[in-house]
Amino acid sequence: MADARGTAPGPTEKPLRTVVIGAGIVGIFCALELQEAGHDVILVDCGPPGGDQAASYGNGAWLSPASIMPMSVPGLWKEVPGYLADPSGPFVIRWRHLPSLLPWLVRFLRAGSSWRKVEVCAAHRYRLCRSTVDWHLKWARSAGTEHLIAREGVWFLYRDRSDIEREAREWKMRKELGVRFSEHDRAALIEREPALSTEYGFGIRVDEGAFIRDTRSYCEGLVAHFCAEGGRLVRSTARSFKMADSRLTHVVSDDESIACDRAVIAAGAWSAELARQAGDNVPLISERGYHVVLPSVIGHPPMSVMPADGKMAVTPTNRGLRIAGQVELASLHAPPNWRRADILLAFGKKLLPGLPGVQSPDRVERWMGHRPSTPDGLPSIGAASDCADIVHAFGHGHSGMIQAPATAQIVSRLLAAGVVSPEDEAFSPRRFGA
C-alpha cells in the first residue's frame, strides 16, 4: 500500500496509523475501509457511536440511491423572505443568525442558479448514492447487523398522479442517471397501510432503496466489529494537529496527543475548525434537523414514506415510529426550537389518521441535531491544502447515512495512491477557494 505521498512501506514496516476524527456514520465507514486496507485505525469521538449527539442517530434512516437533489434549485431565492417570515414552514432561517449565515446563503443560491448546475451536482451526488445499499449490506453482514436493514424500498407519496408534475424534472434526472422506481395507485398504498390518509392517492417507490430499523444499534454494531478487528475507540474531542515539515505527527485531543501518520476529518458539523487548521476554509453550517419518535407505534407504516407536501421521512423503527425532517438554519450553539418537532408530529397525525397511537400518543420523544452542509450540495472529500496527510470527509448534509460508504472508498483510495481521480475532484476542499 502506498502512503499519501505515493511511497509504499516496505514489507517489514508497521502499518500506517490513521486517526479518524468522528464516530458518526461517515467516520465509522472510513475507519472500516481503512482498517480493511491495512491501516492501524483509531476512531476518536467525544460521544458514543450512534449516540443522540450525532446526526447519524437522528436522521430519517434512509438508504436511497434517489437522494441526488441538492437543496438549492432555480427560483429558490424567491422563497427566502418566506423562510425568514414563516416559523412553521419546512425551511426556516432564524433572523438573528442571518448576518453570519449570509455568505453561505449567497453561495447556496448561486449553486442552484441554473438547472445545468443542478444536473451536474445531481450526477456527482448519484455517484455517492447509487450503490449505498450494497455497501451497507457488505459491512452489516460482517458486523452481524444485516437484520437492521429493511430492503422495502422507500416511498414518495403524492395526492394524485398530476401532483408529481411539480417534481417531473427531478424524476427525469433520476431516471436518466439510472435510479429504478415504480409507480403505485391508491389501492396499492392502502393494501400496504390501511391507515394512510385519503389525501394520498399516488406513490413512487424507489425500488432499490432501504432503511435502517435502528440507527443507534446499527452504528454500535459496526463500531463493535471495528474494535473486534483490532481498531481502537477513543472517547475524547480532537482539537488540533501537530506537524513537522508539513507532515502530520499527532492528533491532539482533550485527553492525549495521539501519534499518527494520517488523519481523516469526519466530525460532521464540527469539522470546519479542524479543516481550517489544515489550510482549508470550507463554508460549512449546521442545517439543523428534528425528529419525533412515537415508541408505542411499532410496525406502522410497514415501509418508510416521504409525503411530497411535508418533505419528512416517516420510518418504522424498532424504537417506534420516527418522523424526521425540517431544515432550520441557525448557529451550532442556538437552543432547539421544539415547535419544529411539534410540526412533525402534527403532520404525522395528518398522514396516518387511522392509527390511534399517532393521534393520541402516550409518549413522544423529541430530538434535534446538526447536519453538516456545504452551499453547493456536495461533501468535502480530499487532501487538506497544508498537509496531504490530513483528509477531509465531511459536509454531507441530509445524506451522510447514504453517502458514507462511497465517501470512505474515496478516502481509502486517496490514502493508498496519494491522488484522486478526475471525477472525485468535484469534492475537493479547494473548490471553495481561500
Image (cartoon, rainbow, N blue to C red):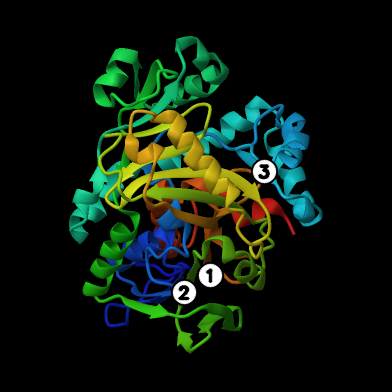
Determine which residue is flagged by label 2: 262
What's the amino acid at mark 1? Ile
| Cα–Cα span, label 2 and label 3 | 39 Å
Classify the position of the C terminus by image quarter: bottom right
Determine which residue is flagged by label 3: 92
Residue 390, which numbered label?
A: 1
Classify the position of the N terminus by image quarter: bottom left
Across the whole image, how many numbered discs are drawn on residues? 3
**N-term-proximal mark, 2 vs 1:** 2
Q: Is residue 208 above or below residue 183?
A: below
Q: Is residue 334 above or below residue 399?
A: below
Answer with left or right where residue 284 lies relative to residue 183: right
Looking at the image, which residue sits at the far top?
A: 162
What's the amino acid at mark 3? Val
| Cα–Cα span, label 2 and label 1 | 6 Å
> In front of the other: label 3 or label 1?
3
Q: Is residue 12 above or below residue 272?
A: below
| Cα–Cα span, label 3 and label 1 | 34 Å
